[in-house]
Amino acid sequence: MLEISESDVLLSMRQDNTWWDNHHAPALADFSTKRAYFDNFKELCLNWNIKRSVILMGPRQVGKTVMLNQLIGELIDEGFPAESILFIGIDTPLYNGIHLEKLVKLFEKQTDHDPSGKRIVIFDEIQYLKDWEIHLKVLTDKLPNTRFIASGSAAAALKLKSQESGAGRFTDFFLPPLTFAEYLNFTELEDTLIQSKLIGENRVYTTNNIDKLNQEFINYINVGGYPEAVVNIDIRNNISLHLGRGIIDKVLLRDLPSLYGIRDIQELNRLFMTIAYHSGQEFSLENLSTSSGVAKNTINKYLEYLEAAFLITRVRRVDDSGKTFQRARQFKIYLTNPSMRAALFTPLKDGDNSLGAMVETAIFSQWFHGQDIKNIHYARWKTGRSEYEVDLVYLASSNLKPLWAVEIKWSNRHCKRPEELKGLIEFSKKNMSGTFEARATTKTVTTETRTDTILIDHIPSALQCYIIGKNVLKNKEEDSFS
């Protein structure tokens, strides 16, 4: 059997770790701005008191590899020995099939550093190594002064293996797509468009230019979930070519088939395209089968794969009292990144019929950044001959009672006609308590209305999207909505 020579592997490692020779941070011309998650990630990685490896997970194109290189850059700038840092891209063909311990041994062979001293070893795209979690667990125990950091794009699959085999050895860190707040920071518009002040213990956010904020919100929906599209005008101007094909080629045609042994790739592709085009709508296995042409008995499996790649998320339905159904015949599906739709199809503009659904997708996607996501549902129920629906409902972790409900609109119509928000009003009547809040988003108006004793808070969708992303990042619990 022909084998790759050790000298070629060593040469590749040196080329991938240029700081061994020049002691300079890796060049990242387009990425001077760091993700809002960077400081927390760095603190976790450098906590030498906890003998654990860090698993950085998240979908493709959200900046995981860039953040790893920014970490390396800061470490070198702060005096961490450059020769004690290793970066390995596991998806590099030259490293195919080489065990992690062997890579570490080759690292020790390449640089003059103390193997028993503090080291940083990064394995990028680790999901491509079979049984990676077993090998990493052994190394974590064997080399307590080496901080291992592994990254990957199949978030759910990584998390499952991390929890099963790495209990007590691994700490998961999730990096989501850009929030709207991060997008405004990347474009240097946050301080211009957003004002904030403390009222009591709460920080309140407002804008003095809602039209400009809405313009940027639509830009965010089209390209803002991807850091590379935000900072690179060429990618931004042709997001379908540069990122849309990457989603299809790398995730649907390569990642998922290789991880799960999928044979009918085009079938999976058809299902995902159907979901992406109709993000935020209610689906059933029956209508998904009809619209995508995929057999019903395979759809659940494919949905799990798409969630594992962090392309979609399913949201469960509740009734008018917030109770879930024993048999989940219907469910909503959202893209995890609103910009995925423009990358796959065409960018949206104000007035397009599909914009309202993507406004809802953008707002919902902000919760992907925190633990609240598991508490968010949508409500639909019948009373007599009438059927009602509420876009989003939050159930408290403590007692599973509704804490708030929100209708997402890209219109100011309901500020003057709040009685038309029938589902929100009926749900609020059923669940009204001292802490329950009812909200409906608008296009430009901030106001309050009262209908049938129900107080409804109206706020522009763009501002609501900003507030949620900002608050979730601060790890606020049960009130990231406000």
Image (cartoon, grey):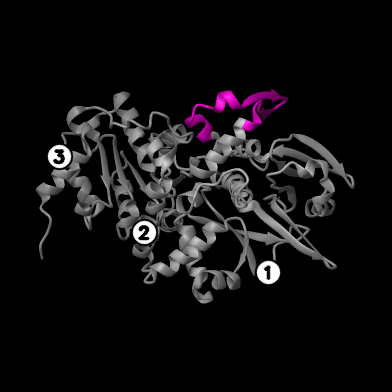
Which amino acid does the dot numbered 3 rest on? Gln
Of callouts 1 and 2, the N-terminal one: 2
Q: Give the answer, above or below, for where 302 lies relative to 115.
A: below
The residue to which callout 3 is attached is: 110
Image location (x, y in percent) of residue 148: 33, 43
Task: Decide if residue 122 is on the left or right side of residue 448.
Answer: left
CA neighbours of label 2 inside 10 A, class few (<14), some (14 to 19), many (20+): many
Of residues 193 and 178, the one drawn nearer to the viewer in this rendering: 193
Of residues 221 and 322, the one drawn nearer to the viewer in this rendering: 221
What are the residue bounds of the magenta stretch?
182-211
Residue 479 sits in quarter: top right
Q: Is residue 380 on the magenta stretch?
A: no
Label 1: element kind: loop
Circles 1, 2 touching at the beta carbon (< 8 Å): no
Task: Decide if residue 199 is on the left or right side of residue 353.
Answer: right
For the C terminus, the image quarter is top right
Q: Is residue 64 visible?
A: yes
The residue at 57%/40% (across/down) is 218
Give the CA distance from mark 1 to mark 2. 33 Å
Which amino acid does the dot numbered 1 rest on? Gln
Q: In front: mark 1 or mark 2? A: 2
For the N terminus, the image quarter is bottom left
The residue at 22%/27% (across/down) is 23
Task: Decide if residue 75 is on the left or right side of residue 187.
Answer: left
Of residues 350 and 61, the one drawn nearer to the viewer in this rendering: 350
The residue to which callout 1 is attached is: 326
Give the CA distance from mark 2 to mark 3. 31 Å
The residue to which callout 2 is attached is: 255
Which amino acid does the dot numbered 2 rest on? Asp
Q: In front: mark 2 or mark 3? A: 2
Label 3: element kind: helix
Q: Is residue 191 on the magenta stretch?
A: yes
